[in-house]
Amino acid sequence: MAKNTSLYFRIVEGRNLPAKDVSGTSDPYCIVKVDNEVVARTATVWKNLNPFWGEEYTLHLPMGFHSLSFHVMDEDTIGHDDVIGKITLTKEAIGAQAKGLDCWLNLTKVDPDEEVQGEIHLGLELLKDTEKISLRCQVIEARDLAPRDISGTSDPFTRVIFNNHSAETSIIKKTRFPHWGETLELELDPEELREEEGTVTVQVWDWDMVGKNDFLGKVEIPFACLHKTPQLEGWFRLLPLGNNEVDAGGKLGALRLKVRLVEDQILPSMYYQPLIDLLVESVISPTEVEDSSALTMLEEVTTVESRQDVAMTLVKIYLGQGLVVPFLDYLNTREVNHTTDPNTLFRSNSLASKAMEQFMKAVGMLYLHEVLKPIINRIFDEKKYIELDPCKIDLNRTRRISFKGAVSEAEVRDSSVEMLQSYLTSIIESIVSSVDQCPPVMRVAFKQLHKRVEEQFTEPENEDVKYLAISGFFFLRFFAPAILTPKLFQLRDQHADTRTSRTLLLLAKALQSVGNLGLQLGHGKEQWMAPLHPIILRSVASVKDFLDKLIDIDHDTASEVPQRAVFMASVTVKEGFLHKHKAEGPQLLSRFAFKKRYFWLTSETLSYAKTPDWQVRSSIPIQCVCAVERVDENAFQQQNVMQVITQDNDGQLHTTYIQCKNVNELNQWLSAIRKVSIYNERMLPSFHPGVHRSGKWTCCLQADRAVAGCSRTHSAVTLGDWSDPLDPDVETQTIYKQLLQGKDKLRNKYLEMPDDDETACNKEKKTNVDVHPDGAECTVQQMKPCQGIAARLLVVIEDLEQAHATFQRREKEDVTSVIMNP
């Protein structure tokens, strides 16, 4: 049974941080680590002791994790950044909160003895000869030790301690992946053999020529274990000294964090198929759209908090089945039929609304990037001061528009209107000219929506409702939110500063008015937006024309989205400038060995060229990728380097080294390449974090270039976003969990309702009239159709519940067997 672990965290804000700069303030940012590996870095908030970040991330961690830590740093232009404090949360602490953590936590001091990482490979044996009793410890190797030296490595040695006995290995210089292969033996007294409370401690230290040695971690094994199992061998996780983190009483400030852990045991696919069948049946063979189905019953038990997750999961399930358009049409038709006032159509956060919203993100994100990214980049680059609200105009923040004197409010307003009109015109023109760029499956879904709304609201006064239904999703729930918060849509790496944020907010408001076809103009409180009304009204005709062209598509021309992929093979998933290591020719100094190249990633190739317009491209086939991993900083004396390892037809491994500009870009590229290669069959279990130079690997110091890797690969560790590969088993497990929570509600409503309660089943027939062979009629009580569906659904839920219990019992039995028979 596979395991699926997802970690959601949001760094909201900080408060009362200490001043680290001479100016009496700080420039704080956060580094987020999972088991001491950096997975994210927030933007720096300059000169602020109460910073707001609002940055959120999702991590998929199939192998699990032990701890999540947030380090708050003060950025310095010169010298090293200052450490302000940290917060560490164990996996157990996060998992104990079913709904997740959402609270303020005080920062604690950073203790180097607690910043440990890595594992050590040990073999322990208790020898009982007639002449002597001894404890033999084989210290084989270690991996991923913490770097303690300025070179980014350590000089590790190991010490084994039991009671007053101790022994040490040799010191291995400049490595985080030492191979000792040494056997240490401690002679014990006969009295010590009878001890049950003792502990064998294995400590790893970084040797320093000057000053005291640095602690790298420890392993503690109860001596009683060696009595029961005289021989132990395996990899052991290194633990900190155990000094309790001291809460500084808020003196170091605090962070507000939101953290949630989702852990699922994933069953084999065959167990989920009955639930998939019920969901598919709901949309391909509904007797009447108003009849109850597995899908409507799921909506009944979905909470407001979980509706967005359920909607995205359903979109992915139906994408994988090639039925996303019928699925959306089913939900939208029910929503339209239940709406009497067209002004309230799709205004609630119903499952239909959320499903359309998540569908656009799943299939339309690359399209959105193509349309908006050039304009968003221009707004960020220009950093104009723009303001229309008289109450918010700050003349001190404006640049001089002329040399005649101080700038007036009127001049600021006129300049702002001119710039906003320019930006808004560019946005509208880019959108209305993008019909051919819009994914066909999106266009077909909008065509179906247009048809349902037109059939429901036939009155002449409701002529615009069919346009508003589409533009409400297209402009209000897709393009406007992307303009307001570009980082959440991966349009930018960082959040906008205060000035740019205000510009984006004003543009998002204007685009919402465009999406409303200008019908609400002049009715709100923000009358200071009036200078933009003319351009909004002028755009209405072109927007309607665009929507008419958008839905002018044949169902058959919409390409089927393949299973396991949200995007088509030829679509560029990610692109941008990176630095590629020049491996051929004479060895250059590290800083000159990386050349700037433009990279493109699709689900088929990772290609690169000198510039975006360069005609000749070099390509790496994705099907040949067998690992995508970080590279140690000391390998090239460069940060944020990754390696793409490929295998040719002859089984030879080839490595391409690529440098990113920062840790966030590094994680994004690692995640993107891992996602498109996640189903490759020849993935490596281990890799070398260093490079082979001067006849040896810089990481483990092994001479053989072909020796097995010294660190484990992380092929399935990815950032969660719209480009996650489709995984029917994981997605169906999410739906099962939601149904399991509502199991009793469904049983009470559909299977235990009184005979006169017909509302739940839409007053479906309760009887059949049978005619016997002798001609006599008799009335036979029949289960209502909705009851039949509910009964089938409950059987599926209970079967899955039983399967989970069976697999968990087997796992416990297997673990017990391993412990008893090592």
Image: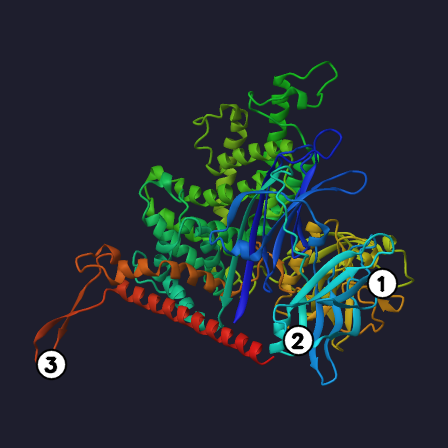
Q: Earlier in the sequence, mark 1 or mark 2?
A: 1
Residue type (three-letter) at the residue carrying disc 2: Leu
Q: Quadrant of residue 128?
A: bottom right
Tell me the element at label 3.
loop
What whole-number distance in Å separates the C-alpha atoms at marks 1 and 2?
A: 36 Å
Q: In front: 379, or 180?
A: 180
Q: Position of residue 589 (x, y in %)?
A: 89, 56
Q: Position of residue 458 (x, y in %)?
A: 33, 44
Q: Amino acid at mark 3?
A: Pro
Q: Which mark is residue 173?
A: 1
Residue type pointed to by label 1: Lys
Instruction: Give the mark toward the camera: 3 or 2.
Output: 2
Residue 554 visible in this rendered orientation of the protein: no
Res 667 quadrant in image: bottom right
Residue 773 badge: 3
Q: Which secondary structure lies at badge 1?
A: loop
Q: Is residue 735 left or right of residue 230?
A: left
Give percent across and percent down for residue 563. Answer: 53, 66
Q: CA distance from mark 3 to mark 2?
A: 89 Å
Q: Earlier in the sequence, mark 3 or mark 1?
A: 1
Residue under label 2, please give it: 193
